[in-house]
Structure formats: structure tokens, C-alpha cells
Image: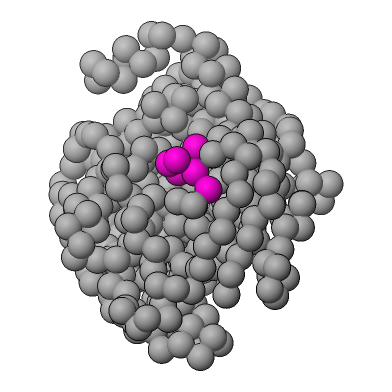
Amino acid sequence: MLFFAVACSLDSHSYSSRFFLEGKKSSCVACHVRLWQQIPKKQVWNRVYKYKIRKEICFNIEASLSNGDKNCLVLGTRGSPLALAQANQVRESLEKLAASQNILLKVEIKIIHTTGDTVLDKSLADIGGKGLFTKEIDMAQLRGEIDIAVHSLKDVPTWLPSGIVLGAVLPREDTRDVFLCYHSNSLSTLPNRAVIGTASLRRQAQILAKYPHLQVINFRGNLQTRLKKLEQRQVDATLLALAGMRRLGLEYPFAHVLSFDEMLPAVAQGAIGVTIREDDEVAYSWISQLDDAHSRICIECERSFLSSLDGSCRTPIAGQAWITENNKLHFRGLVAYPDGSSLVETSKVGDLMNNIEIGKQAGEELRVKIGDNFFEYLRVT
């Protein structure tokens, strides 16, 4: 199947060029499949997020599959129940997609243990650095031990190792946090000195900024481990991501979903990303078909915001982007001291094609508002 892309000027620096191509209704001359759903990134850009301007592209997307050189993909993932649920979601989607095209594709899952999974006696901030839940998976991918990797995008650093690219962002789940407590239905009704368990500095800072009479302690472990600690009354309450609970089919009648005003979620919360090697055309030809344009636009905006603040597990940062019915991109972000003593916020609205710039501007604004002392404080604590 031969695809031809008409020459068009792409002046954005984000993968949301798919939105541009969709708007121009560029099509395959043979079957009129919209080109924005089919183009491999490496054919359009010098590098990911960098476009070649005014290029004509002609290629055969199915060539690498038709010669039968590869009908199996090895999928790398962490080993937690949530990580495996997400990996299985991707595997099932790929195998179903292949079956619809009368192609036999097998996806094998390989569990890889990461630093963030194995070091549980320290807080994420104390372990330090970036890529606590991705480094070992990235290394396996670059060594060729796995073809694709499935990540919770909130755990993925804003930079990716050379040779690895984000091949797809799946349709995003509900991004909100959930408050769980056996004797209270909200943070505001917890008694003085009540103990909340969380490993997230983002949650800790927002809780203490509004409720300084509460105590927050480090609460590591996977979702089931934290729920078990709550059942054992090791803490009075905890907060979890609604997306993770839904993917595991967990329901608690006393769970209270928090609004953005009560608890602004983490950057990229609720989003699953699939990475591939930059030169792997076979993997890309499959993974790109799982990509959700609107989810990616929002994720790019949020990650741009995080990048402009050089955010990590040591930085209490929250940021959320969403698209309204009139196709406008809305963004809210905040930065805070871990003890909640100071918290600054911002909000932006703009066009979808400006998603990267919206996130960048929001981050730069908050960097000025919070002051240089904030970043010095994080370095020495």
C-alpha cells in the first residue's frame, strides 16, 4: 500500500502535528485512509518533536510486515499488578488489531524490575534522580531485549534516552485522585493530627497547604500494598489514582473522588505510554495505530510544563491539561514547598497546536512566582 503525503508546512515542535494533518484531511491516494493515522515519525521529522519543513513523503508502511521478518513483539513492563494490567491492555489491543488485518502477531510480556520497585525503605525523593521506574526498562530496550515498553507516563522523565521514542499515548483514563478513609469522607473532616500515608510530595504539599493540622508520612509500595496498610490502620487515610483503581477493577464504597480544586493530579496521571526504539519500523507500524491524538496533545502540554520546571520526584508539581468541546486546550498547574508553606498556581487557555508553548509558558510563570530560593531549598534538603 503506497502512501503519499502532500507538502504542508508544519511549524510546531510537538507530535500534535497529527492534528494538523487531520485538519487538512490528507489521505492515502490508494484507499483514502487519513494520513495522520499512518505516517511513521522518522519519515517526517529529523528527530521526535522536530519536524522537517515542507517535505513530500512517499513510503510503504506495510513493507516491513509483508516480508514476514517479524511476527512477535517482546513487551517490557514492571511487575506490579497495575503495570501488568496495563501491559495486558496493550497486548490485547495489538493482537486484536493484528487479527482485524488478518495478520498473526504474538506479543510476549517480559517483567523488568526497576530501582523504584526494589528500594522500598526510602521515599522517592530520598532515592533521588530521574527514571526510578524506567531506567532498567530503557536499558533492556536499547540492548534489544524488548521491542516495546509500556509505562505509566507520570513515571517517565521528560527526556528519553537517545534511541528511544514515545510511539503511542493510549486514550487517557480519569486523571483524578481518590481519598480513602474508613472513618471520614473527606480531607476537611479529618481530626487534628490524623495521619495520611503517601509517597507523593505533590499530594503531601497540597494537603499540608490546606490542612496544616494533619500529618503526612511516607507510604511506599504498589497499590495493593498501600490498601493493605490502610486496612491494617497503619494510617488514617491515603490517596490513590482513580485510573489505577479502575484498571485493577477495585471499588471501595467509601472512596471519595477528589476534584481538581481539592487535589490537582500529577503530570501525565492516568496516561499509558508505549516506547519503541527510534529505528524500529515494525514496532512503530503497530504501536502508532494505538495513539490517541487528544491524549497526546494534553500529555505534551503537561510534560512541557514539567520540563520547564525541571521537575522530578523531589519537586511537588501538579499539572493538568484538557480539551473542551470548542477544541480549546485548558491547563492548570501548581508548584509548592513540600511542607505546604508556600504554593503558587497558574492557568492557561489556548489552541491545540500551541500545546507545547502553553505548558512552557505556565512553567516559566511559576518558576518566577515561586522564586529561586525554592530550587535551592530542594537541592539542600
Find out whether residue 305 is within the magenta segment. no
Please determine whether, in this image, residue 66 is positioned above or below residue 54.
below
Front residue of this view, candidates 283 and 135: 283
Please determine whether, in this image, residue 82 is positioned above or below residue 260.
below
Residue at 43% across, 63% down: 284
Q: What is the quadrant of residue 137 in the picture?
A: bottom left
Residue at 32% across, 74% down: 73
The quarter of the rendered structure image containing the N terminus is: bottom right
Say left or right for 69 vs 174. left
Find out whether residue 48 is within the magenta segment. yes
Front residue of this view, candidates 272 and 70: 70
Magenta residues, dominant SS class:
strand
Front residue of this view, candidates 102 and 247: 102
Report x, y in % for residue 353: 68, 39
Residue at 57% across, 17% down: 365
Report x, y in % for residue 118: 16, 54
Residue at 43% across, 41% down: 47
Q: Give the range drawn in magenta.
A: 44-51
Say left or right for 206 vs 37. left
Report x, y in % for residue 49: 50, 40
The quarter of the rendered structure image containing the C terminus is: top left
Furthest-right residue in this view:
326
Say left or right for 165 vs 265. left
- The number of callouts visible is 0
